[in-house]
Structures are given as structure tokens and as C-alpha cells.
Amino acid sequence: MYKRVEGFLLFFASISSILVLFILSPIIALFVSVDPDIFSKTWLEEGDLAFEAWNALLLTLEAATLSSTILLLTGIPLAYILTHHDFPGKTLLEGLIDIPLMIPHSVAGIMLILAFSRNGLYGGLVNALGVTIVDNFWGVVAAMVFVSTPLMIDTLKLGYENIDVTLEYVARSLGASKWVVFRKIDLPLLIPSVATGFLLSWARAVSEVGAILIIAYYPKTMNVLIYEWFNTYGLRYAVALSVVLVLFSLLVFIVLKMVKRK
């Protein structure tokens, strides 16, 4: 029996290793392809290249953090409504929230322009607020929020669904208001999902390029700059930018795994 189990695990491990190797190979190839001189010129020395690279990195991190914060503040109440109440059109609303997972990201950028540019569907409101979306920092944030929404909402919904509703019923029977139940019971128990949702949406925002290329080529995010350097300077310069972005991604997902385990 023991040998059969070992044979079964060995078979599965062999099959699994194919996928692991497939994922690992491009990462290894990226790191071994870094040109030390170009990396130093890009990140460690003073000059136009370093100035452009650091600006793009800081802009990307700032926009991703802001977009994830916006999603968190709006997503917590939305996920609460979706998990605690039934209403006409709920299934349609949940489907609409997940649409960014399915559509090409270049299409997402076009949709955002049609909706929120100064001549778009909500152009009057945008003009009244004095907000510019096209080729502007807020266009970057808008694209990041749009593509990251499903990850945040679905993660928060799962967190709410894992909370024992008996705790809410008992608190309500003892006279606690819905606000008190949310603040004292739901929100503390939701913290792991909040952290996970924030990190997932942040990582997704950092990785976005298609929608940003359409709606806000300027100011340049890291992904747009990688695309531009690849076309202008060649592969080695794009590698020098890409390796830093991959390191950030690895760090985020290591933190995410630590949060989930705790």
C-alpha cells in the first residue's frame, strides 16, 4: 500500500513539475539575461535613463496603491450588500463586476475613454469636476481600478461568506445595530480578506499595460516604459526594467502567502 501511494505521488509530482518548470524557466531566463552595465545605468547611476526609470516605477506604485485603496473603500460595502442581501438584478450585477476578467484590456481602455473622457458619456460630470482622464495620472488610476475590481470584490465576498452568520444573529438578538455588528464582528474577521484583496488588486494594477496604453500613455508607468524601451533601445534595456518589476511581484506574493497562512 505504501509503495502504491509513493508511486501515485511520484506520478503526480512528475506531471506537476512540467508546469512548475514552464513557469520558472522564463523567470530564470530573465534574471540570467540582465546586463550589469545596463542595469547600473538604468537604476544606480544618475542620468536620463535612471530618471525616467525611477519616475515610472514610483508613478506605478503610487497609482496602484491609490487604486487599491479606492477599491477597498468602495468594495467593502459592495461585497457586504452582495453577500447579505438578495435583490432583483443581483446576478446581473455580479456578472458585470467580473466582466474586466474576460474582455481584452485594450478594449477596457477604449471603454474608459468612451465613458470618462471630456467628450465621453460622462464628459459633463468629468468637466465639472475638473478631472482629466486621457494622458493623465487619473487615467492610469481609472484603468487600474477597472481591471482590478473583480479580484477585490470576489476576495471580499469570500471573506464575508466565511464569517459565521450565527455571530451576527446573536449580536443582533442582544440589541446590537447592524453598524455595531459590522464594526465589532464582521470587519475584524474580514481583515485577512482585506489584506489579501488589497495585495491581489495591487499586484493586478501594477501588471496592467493594455488599458493604460490606450487611455494614458503619458505619464509613463513601468509597463508602458518597458514597452517603449523594448522598441527604442532593444531587449537588454527592457530586461533591466523588467527584472525590478518581477522582484516586486515576487515580494508581493510572498507577503500574500504569509498573510494567508497567518
Image (spheres, rainbow, N blue to C red):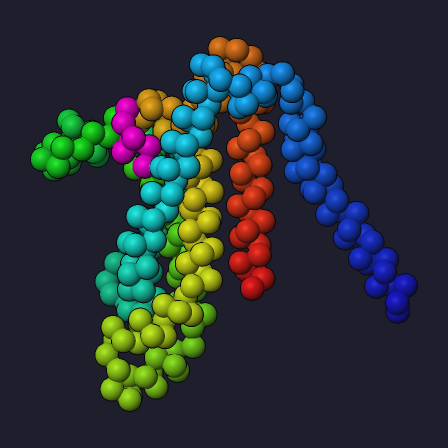
Viewer can see residue 256? yes
Within the image, what quadrant is residue 84 found in? bottom left
Within the image, what quadrant is residue 44 found in? top right
Is residue 37 in the magenta section? no
- Seen at 75% across and 44% down, the residue is 17
Q: Where is residue 131 in the image (x, y as percent from the top left)?
A: 18, 33
Compared across the picture, whether 198 is left or right of 3 comes to left
Q: Quadrant of the C terminus?
A: bottom right
Q: Where is residue 66 in the image (x, y as percent from the top left)?
A: 33, 43
The residues colored magenta run: 135-141
- Seen at 9% across and 35% down, the residue is 128
Query: Magenta: predominant secondary structure element?
Result: helix
Q: In this view, does 239 lie above or below 16?
A: above
Compared across the picture, whether 50 is left or right of 166 comes to right
Q: Is residue 216 above or below residue 176?
A: above
Q: Quick one: which residue is furthest to the front in this view?
A: 46
Viewer can see residue 107? no
Q: Quick one: which residue is furthest to the bottom in this view?
A: 174
> Who is closer to the viewer here, 179 or 85?
179
Q: Where is residue 239 in the image (x, y as percent from the top left)?
A: 58, 22
- Seen at 32% across and 59% down, the residue is 76
Q: In which quarter of the image is the N terminus?
A: bottom right
